[in-house]
Image: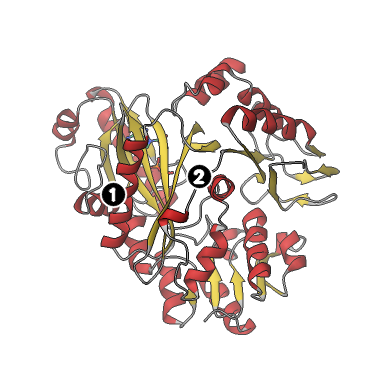
């Protein structure tokens, strides 16, 4: 059952979910903070409920407020989007206990995958290749552990996310201080000081595999995405398919991901994230939610991932089979942020003029409109611009054309940076790893 859906998110993803609901004829309930009354999806939803003040801990992260909003509105399902409560096992559990449908996997799976140590343990057990490193939390002799792995290593917070709670250590002399600093950060950012260490790959690519599974044991993979272009371990440009990986190597990892999902009875959309180094994949984590970059996969498969998530949540069986999934052409996505182009400091404020690009193969997922005020309280993502074309070069040229056509005035954006990056010779040749963008940005500024 899923007769009315509460959208527990804001911004572009809330609008994305609302659009999927409209097409499925599912009535919607929008929830919003006091700073978000003017969000586009709030205006478009069938009902809307204010769930608290601007501070997201008191609104979008406020589990009792969201569960009450479900009860008050009569919603029997919830889509958490990404961020906020999307990978919060307590929230999923409360939704389950209240008898509502959660558009995602079980709280138990979220719990296991939400902790990177238990996720790696499970990944290893179910046959995925993992990044070499400590099997559990850092023990009483970190120097020995690090030596056994071999420098450089990376210290990571077990509960980390969003590119935070990580520190690279190049030599033993920096180890102790790095552990202490990361522990303090992890405690304050995630409320959990647990750390682990693993091999630091100096020039890998970030490649991830999209999966989709229903409660009847049907599991599909929807190919891979290359998300190597990152700043501060956060993705900036994503594309699909990835360049330079043989079909055989891809098939091999796709099959492993499918087996892994079957092993854990995974349900809903999910993403296995890997580092790809020297023609080998190494699992780093699994995201148990829809990802920001899901539209590139939608563009080349023609499938609507959010609609499929909702269909799965309401207990339907996947109708498509693996053999029906075809990869058509190439897609690239740019994350457009309200931020200063050089300092990257967020640039909230009133959007004076907004013009969305269009034309063949262009998709824009954005909640902007003329006069909309970007609030200072949340993530600075204001739009995702996605293009598809028959091949990568046509997609690249099309994306530059669309970026040049786009107008956002009144606030600063990173539109220009995207145009530069897409014109970069290494981007054109596909010769980049996860460090490339940071190095390039340093040289630009
Ligand atoms: P988060 O959950 O914060 O997104 P991830 O574990 O997914 O963290 O890692 C985010 C990014 O950090 C990766 O895409 C990669 O760029 C970098 N990274 C993580 N682990 C390693 C590693 N072992 N070696 C090199 N880079 C890494």
Residue under pointer 1: 256
Q: Is any part of residue 51 visible from this angle?
A: no
**Quick check: is the Cβ at mark 2 less than 8 Å away from ligand 1?**
no
The alpha-carbon separation of the residues under discs 2 and 1 comes to 19 Å
Q: Which residue is depicted at the point 56% across and 50% down?
A: 298
- Rendered residue at 40%/73% (across/down): 93
| Tag 2 near tag 1, CB within 8 Å | no
- Pick whichever, 222 or 423, lies toward us: 222
The tag on residue 445 is none
Question: For the C terminus, which image quadrant?
Answer: top right
**Does the numbered disc 1 mark a residue whose Cβ is under 8 Å from ligand 1?**
no
Residue 95, position in %: x, y?
46, 75
Residue drawn 67% across and 59% down? 15
Q: Earlier in the sequence, mark 2 or mark 1?
A: 1
Q: In the visual, does 140 lie left or right of 241? A: left
Residue 231 percent across, percent down from the top left: 52, 32
Q: For mark 2, what is the residue?
A: 327
Based on the displayed image, in which of its 4 quarters is residue 26 positioned?
Answer: bottom right
Relative depth, front residue between 178 and 227? 227
Q: What element does badge 2 sit on? A: loop
Give neighbour class at mark 1: few <14, some 14-19, many 20+ (Cα, 10 Å): some
Q: In the picture shown, does residue 34 fall above or below 151? A: below
Q: Where is residue 216 in the image (x, y as percent from the top left)?
A: 36, 72
Q: In this view, does 178 lie above or below 92?
A: above
Image side of residue 388 versus residue 281, left or right: right
Task: Give x and y (percent) for residue 282.
Answer: 30, 38
Pair 2/1: label in front: 2
Position of 98 relative to 172 (above/below): below
Q: Which quadrant would residue 32 be assigned to in this image?
A: bottom right
- Left or right: 198, with 365 as reference point: left
Task: Classify mark 1: helix, strand or loop.
Answer: helix
């Amino acid at each position: 059952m899923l007769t009315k859906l509460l959208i527990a998110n804001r911004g572009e993803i809330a609008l994305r979910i609302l659009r999927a609901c409209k097409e499925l004829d599912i009535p919607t309930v929008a929830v919003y903070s006091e700073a978000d009354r003017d969000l586009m999806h709030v205006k478009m939803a069938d009902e809307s409920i204010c769930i608290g003040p601007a501070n997201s801990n008191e609104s979008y992260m406020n589990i009792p407020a969201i569960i009450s909003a479900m009860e008050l509105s009569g919603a029997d399902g919830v889509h958490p989007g990404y961020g906020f409560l999307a990978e919060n096992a307590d929230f999923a559990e409360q939704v389950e206990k209240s008898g509502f449908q959660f558009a995602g996997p079980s709280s138990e799976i979220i719990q296991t995958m939400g902790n990177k140590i238990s996720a790696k343990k499970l990944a290893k057990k179910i046959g995925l290749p993992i990044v070499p490193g400590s099997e559990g939390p850092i023990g009483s002799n970190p120097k020995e552990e690090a030596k056994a792995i071999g420098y450089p290593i990376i210290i990571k917070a077990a509960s980390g996310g969003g590119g935070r709670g990580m520190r690279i250590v190049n030599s033993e002399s920096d180890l102790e201080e790095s552990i202490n600093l990361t522990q303090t950060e992890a405690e304050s950012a995630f409320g959990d000081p647990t750390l682990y260490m693993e091999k630091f790959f100096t020039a890998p690519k970030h490649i991830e595999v999209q999966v989709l599974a229903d409660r009847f044991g049907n599991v599909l993979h929807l190919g891979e995405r290359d998300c190597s272009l990152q700043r501060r371990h956060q993705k900036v440009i994503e594309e699909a398919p990835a360049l330079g990986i043989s079909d055989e190597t891809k098939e091999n990892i796709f099959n492993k991901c499918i087996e892994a999902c079957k092993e854990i009875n995974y349900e809903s959309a999910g993403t296995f994230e890997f580092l790809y180094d020297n023609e080998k994949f190494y699992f780093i984590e699994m995201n148990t939610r829809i990802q920001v970059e899901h539209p590139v996969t939608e563009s080349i498969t023609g499938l609507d991932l959010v609609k499929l998530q909702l269909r799965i949540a309401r207990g339907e069986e996947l109708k498509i089979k693996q053999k029906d999934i075809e990869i058509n052409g190439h897609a690239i996505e740019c994350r457009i942020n309200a931020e200063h182009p050089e300092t990257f400091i967020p640039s909230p404020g009133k959007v004076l003029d907004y013009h969305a690009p269009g034309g063949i193969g262009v998709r824009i997922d954005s909640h902007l409109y003329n006069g909309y005020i970007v609030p200072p309280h949340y993530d600075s993502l204001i739009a995702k611009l996605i293009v598809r074309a028959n091949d990568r070069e046509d997609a690249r040229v099309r994306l530059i054309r669309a970026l040049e056509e786009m107008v956002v005035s009144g606030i600063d954006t990173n539109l220009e940076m995207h145009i530069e990056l897409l014109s970069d010779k290494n981007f054109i040749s596909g010769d980049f790893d996860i460090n490339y963008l940071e190095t390039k940005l340093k040289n630009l500024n």
